[in-house]
Image (cartoon, rainbow, N blue to C red):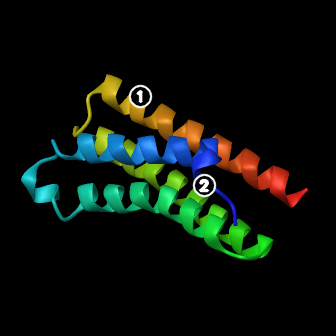
Amino acid sequence: MRDHTKLRAFELADQLALRVYRATSAFPSEERFGLAMQMRRAAVSIPSNIVEGCARQTETEYLRFLDIAYASARELEYQASLAHRLGYFADADYSELKGACVETSKVLSGLLRSLRK
């Protein structure tokens, strides 16, 4: 079995999930079960799918879960953009969160490319 704790992608995804939870705690109360919850689900999905993929027996399954993690990272990037445009994030906070989403996506994409070769 693979050790997810040794993956840079997992480390970034874990940090991103923490960042999203902190950032969405300041959202308006009417977003508690809306965009804030969607962002949290997407953020938690990234490291969770990395962990689950690492626990799978086959390379095919591992890749499938990494694909899901990558898609969740891209989904979160969009949701952060929407939240920013709705005024829920200051420019600096959005820039930091977007950068973390992009970096996580790039690392996951690189990992996927290297495993598919």
Rendering coords of residue 23 (x, y %): 26, 40
Q: Is residue 73 visible?
A: yes
Q: Is residue 61 above or below residue 40?
A: below
What is the quadrant of the C terminus in the image?
Answer: bottom right
Rendering coords of residue 4 (x, y %): 60, 55
Q: Residues within 10 Å of mark 1 (few under 14, many from 20)?
A: some
In the picture of the structure, the residue carrying the numbered disc 2 is: 4
In the picture of the structure, the residue carrying the numbered disc 1 is: 95
Q: Amino acid at mark 2?
A: His
Position of 6 compared to 39: left or right? Answer: right
**View extreme (right): residue:** 117
Rendering coords of residue 95 (x, y %): 41, 28
**View extreme (left): residue:** 29
Position of 72 compared to 56: left or right? Answer: left
What is the quadrant of the N terminus in the image?
Answer: bottom right
In primary-sequence order, the first of circles 2 and 1 is 2
Query: Which corner quadrant of the image does residue 54 belong to?
Result: bottom right
Q: Which residue is depicted at the point 70% across and 68% down? A: 62
Instruction: Identify the secondary structure beneath mark 2.
Output: helix
Q: Nearer the viewer, residue 13 or 82?
A: 13
Q: Which residue is depicted at the point 59% across and 66% down? A: 68
Q: Amino acid at mark 1?
A: Ser
Q: Which residue is depicted at the point 81% across and 52% down? A: 113
